[in-house]
Image (cartoon, rainbow, N blue to C red):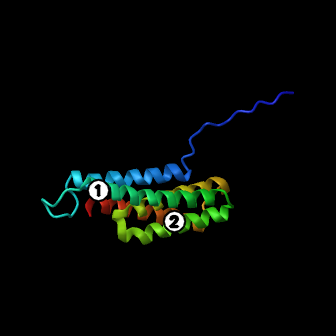
Amino acid sequence: MSTITSSSHRLDVLHPVPAAVTGALIFGLTMTAGEVFDLNSDPAGGPSITAGEVAVYVGIVAAACVIAVWLGLWARAGTPGRLAGTALGLALAAAATFIIFWSGWPIVFGAVAIALAAEHRRRVGSFGAVTLTALILGAAALVAAATTCVLG
């Protein structure tokens, strides 16, 4: 009898890295859209953004990505309970950091919270109260922060 082993080379979209990168891209696109289309509430004719400011934004968002990915990888290596708890913690962090929407943290944390909640559902088979709360809160914080980045 022979055994055939095949490796799956699929992209795991519920992994924290693609989720964090997606959050960072959403942040960059929404901030750019607000500037390019003059939708934000900055005074007309105000100073445009400098290369130094862009570097600061990139550094701040990169820090959020590192934190979210580290927590996400730690949660994925554990039990479904740890996965659900981390998803809720990141969703709460996304909501709490909404006040500094310009940092990108609520968008990155919200995106990773959504991915972790979905990963919990994939493993367990359904959303629990904690993961459903994390999913809704993370999505709400992500959408609210992205909208504020465009208009704010």
Toward which corner of the image does residue 82 lie, by quadrant?
A: bottom right
The single residue placed furthest to the front in the displayed view is 52
Mark 1 or mark 2, which has the lower sequence index?
1
Amino acid type at mark 1: Gly
Total marks placed: 2
Q: Is residue 43 left or right of residue 101?
A: left
Q: Is residue 123 left or right of residue 62?
A: right
User: In the rendering, at what x and y percent does residue 104 appear?
Assistant: 39, 60
The residue that disc 2 covers is 90
The residue that disc 1 covers is 52
Point out which mark residue 67 bears: none
Q: Residue at x 62, y 52 (%)?
A: 122
Which of label 1 and label 2 is nearer to you? Answer: 1
Q: Residue at x 36, y 68 (%)?
A: 100
What SS does tag 1 mark? helix
Above-or-below relation of 11 to 111: above
The single residue placed furthest to the top in the displayed view is 1
